[in-house]
Amino acid sequence: MPQIGSFTLLLALALAAYSFIAGVFALYRKNDRLIETARRAGIACWAAVTVAAIALVMATFGNDFSVAYIMHHSNRDLPTAYKFAALWSGQEGSLLLWAWLLSTYGLFMRLRYKVDPQLTAYASAIVAAVQVFFLLLINFAAHPFGLVKGTIPPDGNGLNPLLQYPEMVIHPPMLYLGYVGVTAPFAFALGALMMKYPGEKWIHITRRWTMVAWLFLTCGIFLGAHWAYEVLGWGGYWGWDPVENASLLPWLTMTAFLHSVMMQEKRGMLKMWNMWLIFTTFLLAIFGTFLTRSGVVSSVHAFAQSGIGTWFVWFIAICFATCVYVFVRNRETLRSEHRLDSLVSRESSFLFNNLVLLVSCFAVLWGTLFPVLSEWVTGSKVTVGPPFFNRVNVPIGLFLVLLTGVGPLLAWRQTSLDSLRRNFLVPTVLAVVAAIVLIVSGMRPWQDSSHFYSLMAIALSVFVVGTIAGEFWRGGRVIARQQHVSVLNGMVQITRRNTRRYGGYLVHMGVVLVIIGFAGLPFNQDKEQEMGFGDKMQIGHYTLVCQSYTQDDKPNYGSEWAVLDVYKIGKKIDTMYPERRFYKASEQTATIVANRSRLNEDLYLVYTGRNPDTGKPIIKAHVNPLVAWIWIGVHLVLVGTIIAMLPSTRPAKYAVSVKERDAAEAVKQGAVGVSGD
Amino acid sequence: MVIQAGKVSNTLKVETQNSKLRLAQLALVAVMAMSFMGADTDARFSKLGHQLMCMCGCNQILLECNHVGCAYSDRMRNELAAGLERGDSDSLVLQSFIQKYGNTVLAAPTNSGFNIVAWIMPFAVFLAASALAVWLVRMWKSRPVAQPITAPQLPADQLDALRRRAREETEF
């Protein structure tokens, strides 16, 4: 297997290099036959990388510990599902996964070349160039099929125990699909700029590819958050670690692009801005990979330090220089076509939305790199942790939530005062009522800044929910009147007719639910206690009673756990089993959290260890309010994104009276707020 | 006299009751003060513990480090509790941690020296970006309105055919 893997990786490099060089030459000489061979070489490259990836997986299943990578990241007793996960648990394997995903994106792009042969030829050459970089890296700097020197050990070191969790089998591939997926819109955008693409078709193609990448990256980020919450056992889901931040950076710029691209589609504005948003997103995705793998910043998630950081620095520099050169040369094709008519318009709301997202992106990048900068300037390193990021990003995030509510209800070009009043009165009243209810319930925003932010987050979320619900209601009612169906049916129909707009609203609704989940953070409680037989612990409304504690031994790990009865107001409501495992091969421990999740709060128990003197388990209990809403919100975001990617159905034609037609026109002009997205 | 004695005895009784009441009030105030002080110490422990990092290399906030057998977090928590028991001020407690573990023990940069740049920069960028946005809006508003081009009128069926073709060619 190692020989097959090594050979196919070299073959893949040769094919990718051919695809790139022949592609560029063919475009320069306008030779269609050569373009076709470059395209086919790109497809063959996918086949070669696929064989290499399969070879590594098969070597893992075959316990071939002569391969250093498998010796370090697998062992004989590792369960089957986690043997797959071994592919991306180390530096070399994860780079191979990256290369395979990139070649798969390239495959889809090249198979669909008839959509626009010329643009796809440019994009194909650019993807091939990126592929060449990663294959060079795999072949010469981080080879996954490197052999063990000296005696081959009988068993491997095993997979990191923190990765032996079902979500870890899908979290990294999702995240990589997002990171790598950014290459496709980058290739189309850069290709369109190179060929001075006439018209706006390229922006539709780019937008769709961006949505795919955004969907995967969102999924990957929140799977990671959920994994951190369920596995790491510290009671939180986001620690502002440099590697977590690295995934957030391209997500923020992609989100900005998905909004500002509408300005280009509808009004022919922000063309240069959009081009640079795509360039920046790609550069940040590569930069994030560099951060994770170079050891520049310290992180618990980072791969082992290696010399591949220099490769990434050069690659980023070359990509940036290429972007600047092509932009300067062809920027005339990106002139705006229209003027802005009013500050109170959809256009300006997009402008501010982009501004806030980009400032947030800068703040995260700045905080992540400040320790390096500080060390360079003062010679002394500092820590930039959660207190910094929360203080800087929470106000920015709240402003963004406000824009989420306001933006979609503003009309293109100009919004009348009457329309503003009509659309915002009810949501504003609802938000004020929500704030009053929260204060009456015991929130004290004037005493504690975290209470203030929490209250603002919930009130603004209510405002956004009000505006979105109003949009669905008004749209559904118009359809219901026209077709004599229920309003709910009307809402479904209007969503199907304009999937992009109403899918977008569902995404916004999901984001709001996530924000509501975050708003519970200041009210978290935790308590740690040693718990022998019959011992009790009181936390929040809950009383925990230890029924027993025991241990077990399995081939892959040994474990010990406690059995805790949970009482609420004197009534037994559950039994929970927090556990700790000791993985034999890697000689590392991992906690298996017991989490009782409800809509109002999570009861989250961690078996932190045993008191060596008494032998009794030490249990840490957390009560985390509203966390479940984060995961519900994420599901809604994903559903909304998928709906937004589906094509809209065309409305059925039917006869309407003059009165109904006028009413529908009025709705189009203002009552529903805006014309369709 | 009896009446007077009765009055004295009543007065004494009232005074005894008052002093008992005062004692009870004093005890209540003392208990409340003690409990509030305890609550205050707990709150300070939590506040300061969230401003410090665990130095074991886990990159976690001190009070959130949950490593089994972590060589640092328990010791650091005890040091924090001892500092609060001694009655040290917040800044003194943080200073003693910096002296012992270095600047990286603080979870966020301080507001002094070069570190202040960390705090100022995001807001400076926000202001600069807002100024840029306002300038852009003004520039766009002042841009001359494009005049519509007078195109020859096409028959409706030809126009429909052209529209259909444009739609088909731009679908992906």
Image (spheres, rainbow, N blue to C red):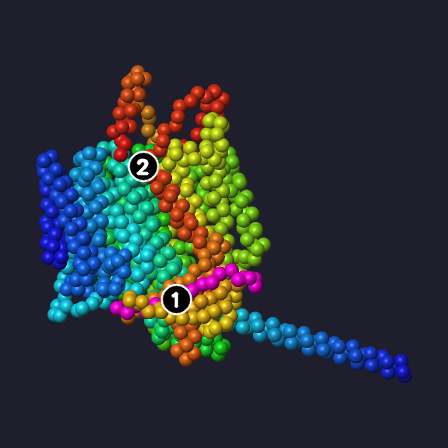
Picture coordinates of residue A81 (x, y %)?
A: 27, 57
**Precedes in sequence: disc 2 or disc 1:** 2
Distance of label 2 from label 1 (alpha carbons): 54 Å
In-front residue for pair A257/A626: A626
Q: Which residues are magenta?
A: A568-586
Q: Nearer the viewer, mark 2 or mark 1?
A: 1
- Depth check: give the residue in front, A359 or B113: A359
Badge 2: residue crowd in 10 Å (few <14, some 14–19, many ≥20): many
Q: In the rendered structure, the residue with mark 2 lies on which chain? A: A
- Give the labeled residue for mark 1: A579
Q: Secondary structure at mark 1?
A: strand
A329 vs A460, nearest the viewer: A460
* Residue pointed to by mark 2: A264
Residue B156, label in figure? none
Disc 2 element:
helix
Q: Is residue A232 above or below residue A613?
A: above
Q: Residue at x 41, y 65 (%)?
A: A578
Amino acid type indicated by mark 2: Gln
Residue A500 in sight here: yes
Residue located at (18% from left, 35% from top): A117
Amino acid under disc 1: Glu
Q: Is residue A446 left or right of residue A45?
A: right
